Amino acid sequence: MKSLKGARVTVYCAGSAKTKPIYLEGAERLADAYIAHGAELVFGGGKTGLMGHIATCIIEAGGVAHGVMPKFLKDIEMNHPLVDDFIFVDTMSERKHLLLVNTEGLIALPGGCGTLEELLEAITLKRLGQYLKPIVIVNQNGFYDPLIQMLERMVEEDFMRPEHLQIWTVVQDPSDALDAILSTPDWSADALQMAVNK
């Protein structure tokens, strides 16, 4: 069976300091799963919101976190103080690229427009065969219901193929996200041809 021990798994999530307790508790359950699996967190490097909370929980439990952050956010001291392994980049585009490099999958917790933009770009990259690893959407509290419905409508309206519904996996609780990555096969390297033949 595939293992995530030592594997880098990315999390997209909110950096807002106003995050509700229900989502902070969800981040704690995901952090517990990281520790149980021995996986390493790759994240946007922020110290606040879900982003900061999951990193703190993982690090304090003896786990590993890798941060990727634009320099302009470091300049206003948004970087997480407990993270030792940081890459600082010039642009958000560079950040998004590095958040996916050498990872075994990505997980989207609830978040704002940045989280949504990152998630949709990753879905697009996977559709085009540029990212082949599992994408897990954590639909805690029904947060992503409207997005999932929109993606399904894109298929219904023939903007995507029915096979593209397999690009992402949905779980309801953060504690199930890493198990979903383990049970989801990599996407086909022929994905671009599928997109061309839409």
Image (cartoon, helix red, strand yellow):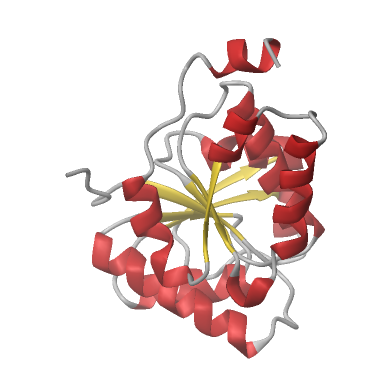
Q: Residue furthest bottom?
A: 21
Q: Nearer the viewer, residue 4 or 43?
A: 4
Q: Residue at x 59, y 73 (%)?
A: 140
Across and down, in percent, residue 71 comes to 72, 49
User: Where's residue 78, x and y in %?
Assistant: 69, 66
| Direction left: furthest residue | 1
Task: Depth check: give the residue in front, 25 or 54.
Answer: 25
x then y, percent, for residue 169: 51, 50
Q: Position of residue 33 (x, y in %)?
A: 34, 68
Evaluate whether residue 124 shows in this view.
Answer: yes
The quarter of the image holding the N terminus is top left
Image position of 37 with respect to 97: above or below? below
Residue 170 is left or right of residue 119, and the answer is: left
Labels in figure, total: 0
Q: Please tell me which residue lies in front, 184 or 10.
A: 184
Q: Please name the residue shown 23% across and 52% down the image.
A: 5
Left or right relative to 36: residue 157:
right
Does residue 58 lie above or below 88 as drawn? below
Q: Residue at x 75, y 83 (%)?
A: 18
Q: Quadrant of the C terminus?
A: top right
